[in-house]
Amino acid sequence: QVQLVESGGGLVESGGSLRVSCQASRALFSVMGWYRQAPGKQREFVAAISRDGTRRHADSVEGRFSISRDNAKSAVHLQMDSLAPEDTAVYYCNAGGRPLTTPGPYWGQGTQVTVSS
């Protein structure tokens, strides 16, 4: 079992940057990921990172978003640059996925990211 708490969401203008973070209640799982869900849409994969540092990013965010992890602090971060209105969604932290693009059983409560045009 693990508790995941996201933070760092908010309102930002198009083209701006935001960093969301996820704090885990225990040591990080081998695979940690971020997913997002926009209104009226299914939850979708955004990014994931393994313990050895292997990363995957969705095509829609490649080159704009970057996932990282701090194993010592049990935290995972998602740096989001060049944000666009279509990035507006609730962003969820996920733990325990395998392989990288398959979500694990543990989810945070989500943090809202809103990008204004």
Image (cartoon, rainbow, N blue to C red):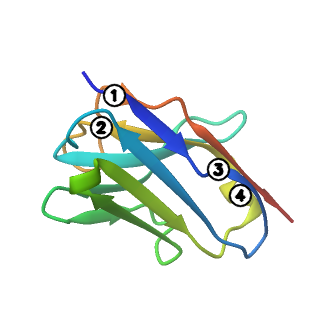
Q: For the residue marked with disc 4, what is the amino acid? A: Glu
Q: Which residue is mark 3?
A: 9
- At mark 1, the secondary structure is strand
- At mark 3, the secondary structure is loop
Q: Which residue is mark 1?
A: 106
Of the two numbered discs 2 and 3 on the same chain, state the one appearing first in sequence.
3
Q: Which residue is mark 4?
A: 86
Of the two numbered discs 3 and 4 on the same chain, state the one appearing first in sequence.
3
The quarter of the picture where the C terminus appears is: bottom right
Q: Are marks 2 and 3 in contact (CB under 8 Å)?
A: no
Q: Are marks 2 and 1 in contact (CB under 8 Å)?
A: yes
Q: Which residue is mark 2?
A: 95
- The spot of residue 20 in percent (x, y) is 54, 55
- At mark 2, the secondary structure is strand
Q: Are marks 1 and 4 in contact (CB under 8 Å)?
A: no
- Residue 63, relative to residue 110: is it above or below? below
Q: For the residue marked with disc 3, what is the amino acid? A: Gly
- The spot of residue 110 in percent (x, y) is 56, 35
Judge by depth and name the residue closer to the eye, 65 or 76.
Answer: 76
Q: Which is more foreground, mark 1 or mark 3?
A: 3
